[in-house]
Image (spheres, rainbow, N blue to C red):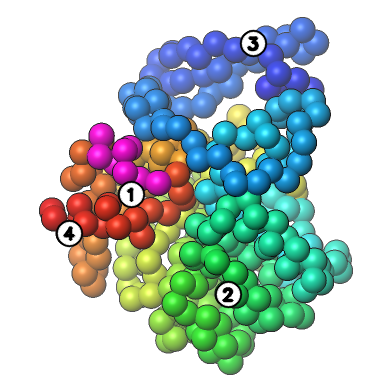
Amino acid sequence: MCEECLDLVPAKIIFEEGQVYYLKRCDQHGVQKTKVSSDISYFKDCKNFIKPGDRPHQFQTRTHYGCPLDCGLCPDHEQHSCLALIEINDECNLECPVCFAGSSPSIKKNKSLSEIEKMLDALVASEGEPDVVQISGGEPTIHPEILEILALAKTKPIRHLMLNTNGVRIARERDFVEKLAKFMPGFEVYLQFDSFEKEALENLRGTDLRTIRRKAIEHLNEFNISTTLVVTVKKGVNDHEIGKIIDYALEFKNIRGITLQPVQDAGRNLNFNKNTDRILLSDIRQAIIDQSSHFKAEDIIPLPCNPESISIAYAIREGKKVSPVTSLIPKADLVAEVPNAIAFEKNKELRQKVIDL
């Protein structure tokens, strides 16, 4: 797409000085050169993880103008929803400079329980049994009916339910966390955790959240609620902390994963310069390799559900000891047996292969 008008335009993939670029030409806005990867070898390997998609059971919209102008699950979609977000509100108790949803305390808008049930039912109609569903916002924990919403979601045939949160309420209200624990098993908190440094947090979140983050993790660990730390990575701000965050996560028995996502130039992304602030998936992958002793390059592989946009590494954890397993399974077996899903640890065949190792 053209970066200015978003029209579909011709493009070439070019390799130059170890980098991968899209060279695009728009009749209106001229030639654009966009870097898409800093690792040619990994970029090429992503093609080896492409597999046929799993079509949705039911489409929710019609095709009018063609991609990218038709939003939603239209008949042109060749892949189902590997991960679905149910956004229950626009209000938030923070006003993060990097919020891709543009949420804030000034937007007093919450969806009703009946609206949310319609959203869940539409998802189930398309998916049958959705793999992973995130209850998100805004900040979902401040929705006045958040516990009722989670209880409703648990009545649906959802394999894994997540609560996407900045952790402020979780840090301040221990009794709320105790209530969340009742949704286990099959429930997880997807906890925002960007940095240990005051300056980085103020850059990303507009305020120093170090105490809030620690307290939230303490409460979740106390009730052994499965937790994934979610790091929004911005170049030159917190990309040097990736290894430290991995080591920190190993201090807590309830933390089962870390998601590292590049800052997205969407919504409210204040003072963002794509030439200096943008970080690529390949950059984050390399930072894990460089900063952590736990994972090597061969352990971090493309996810077949969306190989050019997501890398994943699985490991068996015993206390603070981490034993990567992704690289031990032959690529042909991974591609053949891994489902088109964002998380595949529940796949019986794959789990058996890990046991056999």
Nearer to us of marks 4 and 1 is 4
For the residue carrying disc 4, how many other residues have a C-alpha within 10 Å: few (<14), some (14-19), or many (20+)? few
Compared to 82, does 185 lie above or below? below
Q: Nearer the viewer, residue 238 or 91?
A: 91
The disc at residue 154 is 2
Residue at the image point whose x is 39% and y is 61% from the top: 257
- Please report contact status of discs 3 and 4: CB closer than 8 Å, yes or no: no
Q: Position of residue 210 (x, y in %)?
A: 54, 71
The disc at residue 10 is 3
Q: Counting residues from the N terminus, which is met first, the one under dot 1 or under dot 2?
A: 2
For the residue carrying disc 2, how many other residues have a C-alpha within 10 Å: few (<14), some (14-19), or many (20+)? some
Q: CA distance from mark 4 to mark 1?
A: 17 Å
72 is within the stretch colored magenta: no
Q: CA distance from mark 3 to mark 4?
A: 47 Å
Would you name the residue on which mark 4 appears?
Answer: 355
Compared to 320, does 182 lie above or below? below
Q: Amino acid at mark 2?
A: Lys
Q: Position of residue 355 (x, y in %)?
A: 17, 59
The kind of secondary structure element at disc 4 is helix
Compared to 222, does 58 lie above or below? above
Q: Is residue 311 left or right of residue 36?
A: left
In the rendered structure, which segment of residues is drawn in magenta? 332-339
For the residue carrying disc 1, how many other residues have a C-alpha within 10 Å: few (<14), some (14-19), or many (20+)? some
The disc at residue 313 is 1
